[in-house]
Image (cartoon, grey):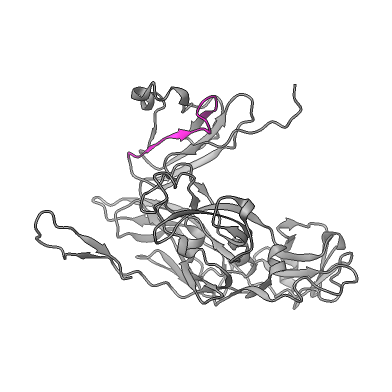
Amino acid sequence: MLTDPVPKWDNPTASLTPGVVKIGDLVKLSGPGNDEDKVHYTLDGTDPTIDSPMYNWIAYRWWKDRSDELDQINHPIEIKDNTIIKAITIGPGRLDSDVVTFEYLATLTLIKDNPAPAIRNQEYSHTFRAVCGVEPYSFSITNGSLPEGLTLNQETATVEGTPTESGTYTFTLTVTDSADPPKEASCEFTLVVVEAPPTLVADTTDNVVGQPIELSFTDDQTWREAITDIKVNDTSIAGQYTVEFGKITIDATVFSTAGSYAIAVIATGYLDAIVTQQVTSPGSGHQPGDDEDIMLTITGDGVARPREYTKSQLEAMPQEQHVYSSVNTWPTKSWYVGRGVSLQHLLNEAGIMGNAQQIKFYSRDGYYQTLTVQQLLHDRRYRYPGFMSGGQEGYIPGSSSGATEVPTIVGLKAVNSDNPDYMSETETPLLMIGQRAVTEQTGPQFVKNLNRIEVLTTPPDSWEVPRAQPAPGTVPAGTLVNLSSTY
């Protein structure tokens, strides 16, 4: 009899990376050992249990002896339509794993991502995305309506304009492809148009541990009465604040230690009002970051609240640690591990706007990388545990099995390795980003010594089409064709 905590089984993995796939593709599920750890799954959207179908009937130890019948018994799941697989690892001696979801898109589909909120009387743009159909597509609103002031470009699926009325707008978007006969797919979306909140001003008078914090603002009665909650470092402080004319007072008990606190005031019908509050130790007369240089700035016409951060302010924010797979342009495969602040958290603090199109990341030495908002914030990015299979050379595709979604972070400690014991502050802040495919060359996007993020509303350019040499036409058998891009 033991009193030790009971460990959990590791989550099951899938051989095919979730996302866009082809009809007929096969998905194989695996447990951590494929022995007593059995993978149970469902295809109807419900959570699997021990009563659900089992995948890995034959234990791994027998695979060599039964290779001729392995796929007949541990039969792969064939993609016949858009498919959601939910899976769990169950076995003796451990707690069940988490339920994991693998979603595959194989027929014409609109990606279900509700657009970011728009701000009344401010320019806005959002582009919807269709996959798995025959291009070109055409788009239309078939139920409901867009906010007044916004229109849909029926060729690009871009909603743009300047909304003039706040509110919640639900509408159905339909895409029609160019197949013969044409196929259609529809999806319901919700777009919220909010008001801009007043600007919060941090307390710089009695901002000491043990004292209540008073935030000031140009009074707006409608906004005051719409406040529903206040969060400090992403945690609700309901019941620990008061709101009055031009002032919000937060209880001293919320700020138990000196440091930097991210405060968000949430009001119905408004964009969150965010401010960073410094709290000092009693008698110090010093605010964290007072004597520090600015480490990172966030600017551009795509943010409502430009921000400047010192090292200590960034370190006081919620921290995340992740491992990243990466391929550079040599090409060579490599691992990174880092700990830092979620890029989404930083952009939320700066009030990224709905019509933001591009984000530029600048290094102290002038190097920069540009990514679109779609590529960075909407496309799913992964770590591929098996991407080293086949060798370290980047031109040899590794395995995409077991792909794990990872967020983009600004690493404050990092290392070009998968061993966190080696992490240091050398060349940080470091932009750290996952791969969209196991072959994607993300190495150049790991911007070292990051010191500025610029969010822009300018639409991105398109890459020029690739070229072939020799030119298309009649050529002798055995002719070799070289493909190239602009650069």
Picture quarter with the C terminus: bottom left
Position of residue 184 in the picture relative to residue 262 (left or right): left
Picture quarter with the N terminus: top right
Q: Residue at x 70, y 58 (%)?
A: 234
Q: Which residues are magenta?
A: 24-39
Percent of width and height locating residue 467: 24, 66
> Magenta segment: does it hold 33?
yes
Percent of width and height locating residue 13: 49, 38
Dominant SS of magenta comes to loop
In the image, residue 316 above or below residue 15: below
Position of residue 212 in the picture relative to residue 5 (left or right): right
- Foreground residue among 130 and 395: 395
- Foreground residue among 307 and 285: 285
Percent of width and height locating residue 63: 41, 25
Inspect this view and state whether residue 192 appears.
Answer: no
> Magenta segment: does it hold 138?
no
Q: Quadrant of residue 241?
A: bottom right
In the image, residue 233 above or below residue 82: below
| Total number of numbered discs in the rendering | 0
